[in-house]
């Protein structure tokens, strides 16, 4: 790859750093599994780096229950064709993209296409599902994008002031979130599926100072 990638481990924290390169800091990381235990932390530490984390799938959805942290200018992408359940903590990073659809990116150079999650064309397909948020509060420096073939479940408090884009093939959006907040654009597309925002005894608070 154009950039070299260094891994280091301290306790239960794995830090991933990407070297500088003329085309920027970019890394495509192929994992046998994207599962991260609740006690584990992945630190995407390089400023301005794009980390494209891919799994070929093992028949079960990736369960990311640990902590995802990193540099405030880092973009982190998780792709698993079997689905993704992201219920741990997300802290500090700039952009987060979670997808069950392969982006068709095979080299670190091409990973530049996901530097801005909104500019890369992804057509939702299949039936695999995504669950993101759990009871955790996520605050991103810029954008959140979620792409799924099947249903998408959003929980916790989600704030991404650069914009939030949620899209599925024909699956429903089921949100038990307390707050979805952005000063950018909020886009929700579920094909022929339903959009269901349920805060139980609370009130639904979907806020955007841009467009909805």
Image (tube, rainbow, N blue to C red):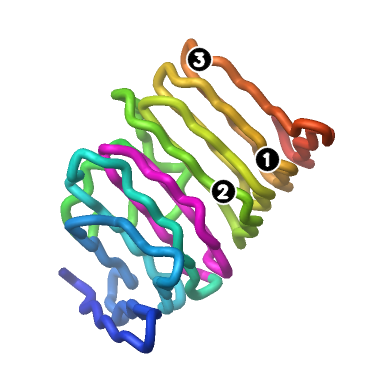
Snapshot quadrant of residue 37: bottom left
Point out the frontmost of discs 3 and 1. 1
Which numbered tag is attached to residue 177?
A: 1
Residue 109 falls in image quadrant:
bottom left
Q: What residue lies at 31% left-to-right and 81% top-to-bottom?
A: 20
Vertical arrangement, residue 67 with respect to residue 34, above or below: below
Q: Is residue 69 magenta?
A: no
Residue bounds of the magenta highlight: 73-99
Q: Does 97 appear in magenta? A: yes
Mark with earlier residue (2, 3): 2
Position of 39 relative to 210 (above/below): below
Instruction: Provide residue 77's location: percent of width, then percent of height.
Output: 38, 54
Tell which residue pokes out farthest to the bottom in this image: 10
Q: Is residue 154 left or right of residue 23?
A: right
Q: CB under 8 Å between callouts 2 and 3?
A: no
Residue 176 % position (x, y) = 66, 35
Q: What residue sits 43% from the left and 78% below the top? A: 45
Which-is-in-front pick, marks 2 and 3? Answer: 2
Q: Quadrant of the N terminus?
A: bottom left
- The tag on residue 193 is 3
Total of numbered circles in the picture?
3
Q: Measuring 59% from the left and 57% from the top, which residue is drawn there? A: 142
Q: Disc 3 versus disc 1: distance between alpha carbons?
A: 18 Å
Front position in the image: 92 or 107 = 92
- Is there a contact, CB below 8 Å, between mark 1 and mark 2? yes
The local crowd at label 2, few if under 14, some if 14 to 19, many if 20 or more residues have their Cα within 10 Å, is many
């Amino acid at each position: 790859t154009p950039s070299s990638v260094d891994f280091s481990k301290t306790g239960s924290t794995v830090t991933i750093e990407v070297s500088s390169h003329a085309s920027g800091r970019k890394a495509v990381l192929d994992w046998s599994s994207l599962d991260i235990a609740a006690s584990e932390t992945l630190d995407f530490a390089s400023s301005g780096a794009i980390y494209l984390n891919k799994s070929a799938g093992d028949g079960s959805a990736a369960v990311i229950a640990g902590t995802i942290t990193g540099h405030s200018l880092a973009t982190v992408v998780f792709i698993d064709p079997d689905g993704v359940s992201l219920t741990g903590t997300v802290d500090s990073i700039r952009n987060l993209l979670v997808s069950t659809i392969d982006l068709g990116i095979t080299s670190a150079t091409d990973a530049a296409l996901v530097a801005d999650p909104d500019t890369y064309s992804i057509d939702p397909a299949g039936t695999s599902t995504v669950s993101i948020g759990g009871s955790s509060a996520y605050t991103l420096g810029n954008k959140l994008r979620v792409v799924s073939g099947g249903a998408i479940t959003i929980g916790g408090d989600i704030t991404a002031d650069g914009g939030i884009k949620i899209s599925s093939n024909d699956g429903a959006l089921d949100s038990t979130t307390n707050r979805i907040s952005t000063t950018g654009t909020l886009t929700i597309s579920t094909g022929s599926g339903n959009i269901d925002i349920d805060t139980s005894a609370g009130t639904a608070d979907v806020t955007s100072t841009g467009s909805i």
